[in-house]
Image (tube, rainbow, N blue to C red):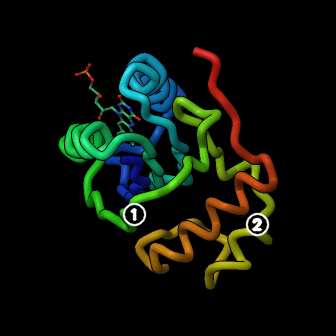
Amino acid sequence: MLVRLMYASRAVEPLGPAALVAILRRSHAHNPAAGITGVLCHSGSIFLQVLEGGRSQVSALYNRIAADPRHHDVVLLSYEEIAERRFAGWAMGQVNMKMLNPALLLKYSETAVLDPYAVSGKVSAALFDELIATAAVTCQST
Ligand SMILES: Cc1cc2nc3c(=O)[nH]c(=O)nc-3n(C[C@H](O)[C@H](O)[C@H](O)COP(=O)(O)O)c2cc1C
């Protein structure tokens, strides 16, 4: 039973490179053993993360992440049962929005600023699909 979950949140403090590396390091240490794959997108203080895997594992991880004091305003954007993974290659891929063509953001939103609170879960999912198609996802070597 595979599921895919997407949520948005806001970092409590401006996100420095060290803070992001710490999160990705934890993800790479934990996610493979739990069979979790996904992508973490960050822009300014906004996080957008997709988690895929077994229903219990995704649920447990989401609850743990939601309780993490490093971010707040955690909002569930979408949750679905899936036949196959979309991000099978990434224990936790990373999208740095600074490296993105603003045209991709403009395609789906009013301004070239990532704001998952202002668009539907479907729009955020469509943006993610394009990020994968344009290979904008990188893997942090930690
Ligand atoms: C935006 C964000 C994304 C995170 N993503 C993951 C993740 O994919 N996997 C993970 O294990 N922890 C992730 N974490 C960290 C968890 O919230 C939590 O700190 C960690 O799982 C606790 O692990 P520990 O109890 O072994 O220290 C994330 C935290 C934040 C703020």
Crowding near the residue tagged with mark 1, few <14, some 14–19, many ≥20 C-alpha atoms within 10 Å: few
Of the pair 96 and 134, the residue shown nearer to us: 134
Q: Say if 59 sits above or below 116 in the image.
A: above
Rendering quarter of residue 103: bottom right
Q: Secondary structure at mark 1?
A: strand
Quarter holding ligand 1:
top left
Task: Please name the residue shown 50% across and 37% down the image.
Answer: 37
Q: Label 1, label 2: how many angstroms apart (C-alpha)?
A: 28 Å
**Left or right: 39 with respect to 74?**
right
- Looking at the rendered structure, the secondary structure element under dot 2 is helix
Residue identified by numbered label 1: 80
Quarter placement of the C terminus: top right
Q: Position of residue 67 (x, y in %)?
A: 18, 42
The residue at 38%/58% (across/down) is: 7
Query: Would residue 137 be found to the left or right of residue 69 on screen?
Result: right
Chain-order first, disc 1 or disc 2: 1
When the figure is inspected, residue 1 is found, relative to residue 36, above or below; the finding is below
Q: Is residue 68 visible?
A: no
Q: Amino acid at mark 2?
A: Pro
Q: Where does label 2 land, which residue?
A: 102
| Mark 1 beta carbon near ligand 1 (under 8 Å) | no
Q: Amino acid at mark 1?
A: Glu
The residue shown at (62%, 80%) is 109
